[in-house]
Image (spheres, rainbow, N blue to C red):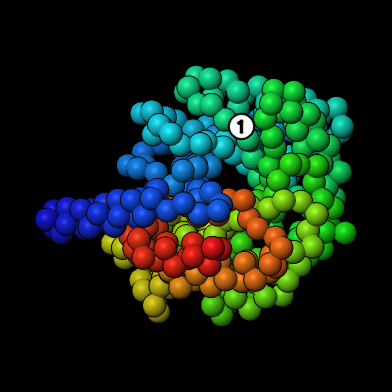
């Protein structure tokens, strides 16, 4: 068993380093980047020139927005990598906020990002915020973004924010945030469903309903392509939540689950698994992207942007050896060649 694990680790590492060599050698018209979305920095190598690094989340606690799960760096980041800190904010942060609250939050986020960057000797030129705002929170979120951008501009930095495809298509209703650049997340287009046909991470049919609107969006855009997996947890046909970075072999070796179909498992009894409570009959469905999925996403995103529009950065979500094990250097070469 130990030999098998060691062999697998070596194979994944070789593939990882091969991809690293290719991405660092290639000189495209756009930057190539990865997202890193763990709370502990332990990536062996960054196979790109740019890294979107999750710094912390902001969630409401006792009615106040507070930073949670800050990134821990037990070792230094690789040199010569451009780092963009990313702050994830739940939409609920803006449910009851006032303009004064939004201004105070902008100040706190600005100060904490700078303090963390200084502590870890990280220099950055861009800060990115990630929030799936709604119609009811738009005004407060936009006010927060505008305040944060003003503080960043005063220190020679820029602000970007994540965008979903529905916010691109319905921009007149959802509004255009006051930011310098948008990062189009080209995956997870609709609501999660317990027993949906196809993957909820990326579905080409859903993407085609929105992608033609990309070219007319009034902000410069970057692009994030899917390269990840998750497990959809459902109960009695309703989605309970997601278990990220959960592998099928972890589920198979836990005696509380039984396999009922390919990539589908059912709880035999009540238990806790990966910090989540399961009742008898609860189901987990493993979904993961393959190279052909990421390639199809790239083609649709490129087609939707039109011939006169180019993405400044092509990013992959996310940097994890478990995600990379199914991708060879040739896969990355084919995906990135779409944008040449």
Residue 69 in view in this figure = no
Residue that mark 1 sits on: 125
| Vertical arrangement, residue 170 with respect to residue 87, above or below | below
| Vertical arrangement, residue 157 with respect to residue 322, above or below | above
**Closer-to-camera residue (255/90):** 90
The quadrant in which the C terminus is found is bottom right
Residue at (54, 60) in percent of width and height = 225
Q: Position of residue 94 (x, y in %)?
A: 78, 40
| Secondary structure category for the residue under label 1 | loop
**Closer-to-camera residue (53/214):** 214
Task: Give the farthest residue toward the left.
Answer: 3
Residue 103 in view in this figure = yes
Q: Position of residue 275 (x, y in %)?
A: 45, 48
| Vertical arrangement, residue 33 with respect to residue 146, above or below | below
Q: Residues within 10 Å of mark 1 (few under 14, many from 20)?
A: some
**Closer-to-camera residue (264/255):** 264
Residue at (68, 67) in percent of width and height = 307
Q: Position of residue 90 (x, y in %)?
A: 68, 44
- Name the side, left or right, on which 328 lies relative to 219: left
Residue at (61, 62) in percent of width and height = 186
The quadrant in which the N terminus is found is bottom left
What is the quadrant of residue 155 in the picture?
A: top right
Residue at (83, 37) in percent of width and height = 143
């Amino acid at each position: 068993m130990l030999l098998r694990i060691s062999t697998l680790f070596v194979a994944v590492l070789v593939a990882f380093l091969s991809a690293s060599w290719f991405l660092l050698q290639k000189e495209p018209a756009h930057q190539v980047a990865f997202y890193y979305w763990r709370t502990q920095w332990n990536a062996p190598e960054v196979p790109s020139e740019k890294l979107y690094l999750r710094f912390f989340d902001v969630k409401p606690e006792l009615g106040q927005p507070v930073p949670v799960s800050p990134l821990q760096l037990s070792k230094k980041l690789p040199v010569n990598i451009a780092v963009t800190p990313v702050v994830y904010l739940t939409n609920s942060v803006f449910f009851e906020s006032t303009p004064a609250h939004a201004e105070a939050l902008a100040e706190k986020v600005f100060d904490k990002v700078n303090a963390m960057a200084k502590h870890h000797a990280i220099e950055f030129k861009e800060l990115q915020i990630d929030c799936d705002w709604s119609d009811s929170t738009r005004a407060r979120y936009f006010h927060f973004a505008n305040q944060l951008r003003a503080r960043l501009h005063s220190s020679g930095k820029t602000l970007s924010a994540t965008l979903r495809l529905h916010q691109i298509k319905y921009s007149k209703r959802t509004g255009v945030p006051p930011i310098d650049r948008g990062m189009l997340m080209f995956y997870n287009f609709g609501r999660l469903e317990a027993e949906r046909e196809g993957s909820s991470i990326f579905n080409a049919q859903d993407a085609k309903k929105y992608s033609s609107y990309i070219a007319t969006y009034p902000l410069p855009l970057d692009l994030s392509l899917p390269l990840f997996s998750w497990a959809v947890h459902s109960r009695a046909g309703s989605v309970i939540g997601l278990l990220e970075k959960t592998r099928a072999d972890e589920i198979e070796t836990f005696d509380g689950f039984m396999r009922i179909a390919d990539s589908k498992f059912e709880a035999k009894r009540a238990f806790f698994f990966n910090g989540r409570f399961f009742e008898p009959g609860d189901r987990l469905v493993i979904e993961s992207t393959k190279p052909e999925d990421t390639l199809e996403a790239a083609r649709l995103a490129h087609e939707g942007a039109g011939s006169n529009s180019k993405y400044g950065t092509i990013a992959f979500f996310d940097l994890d050896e478990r995600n990379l094990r199914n991708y060879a250097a040739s896969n990355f070469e084919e995906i990135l060649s779409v944008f040449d």
